[in-house]
């Protein structure tokens, strides 16, 4: 799976970056954003990053956290 550009230089181990990328793609598809690169997907990436920074490492928990972060934004 390709790593979204905002995740390329984050201080996480490769497995965590893979999880972040997977959740990012899943949430983007759930929101109907497709694979474009724009400010809206950047917001999704930032939400995923916030959840990762909290130490979340479970896919479903990170997906939920990402949705919650987007709703709060």
Image (spheres, helix red, strand yellow):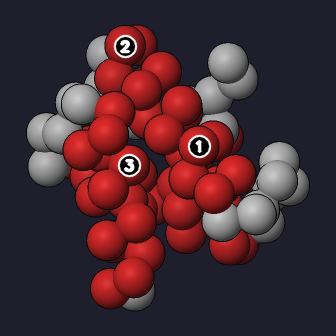
Q: In the rendering, at what x and y percent does residue 15 appear? A: 37, 13
Q: Nearer the viewer, residue 37 or 56?
A: 56
Q: Residue 67 carries which label?
A: none
Sooner in the amino-acid sequence: mark 3 or mark 1: 1
Q: Residues within 10 Å of mark 1 (few under 14, many from 20)?
A: some
In this rendered view, identify the residue nearer to me: 62 or 7: 62
Which residue lies under the disc numbered 2? Answer: 15
Q: Which residue is drawn at 43% across and 75% down?
A: 70
Residue behind mark 1: 26
Q: Earlier in the sequence, mark 3 or mark 2?
A: 2
Look at mark 3 in the image and give the residue it sits on: 63
Residue drawn at x 68%, y 72% as measured from the top left: 40
Rendered position, 35 above or below 20: below
Residue 25 appears left or right of 33: left
Q: Distance between the residues labelled 3 and 2?
A: 16 Å
Specify whether 8 is left or right of 1.
left
């Amino acid at each position: 799976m390709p790593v979204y550009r905002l995740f390329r230089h984050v201080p996480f181990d490769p497995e965590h970056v893979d999880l972040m990328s997977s959740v990012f793609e899943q949430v983007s598809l759930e929101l109907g954003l497709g694979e474009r690169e724009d400010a809206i997907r950047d917001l999704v990436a930032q939400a995923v990053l916030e959840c990762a920074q909290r130490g979340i490492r479970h896919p479903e928990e990170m997906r939920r956290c990402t949705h919650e972060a987007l709703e709060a934004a």
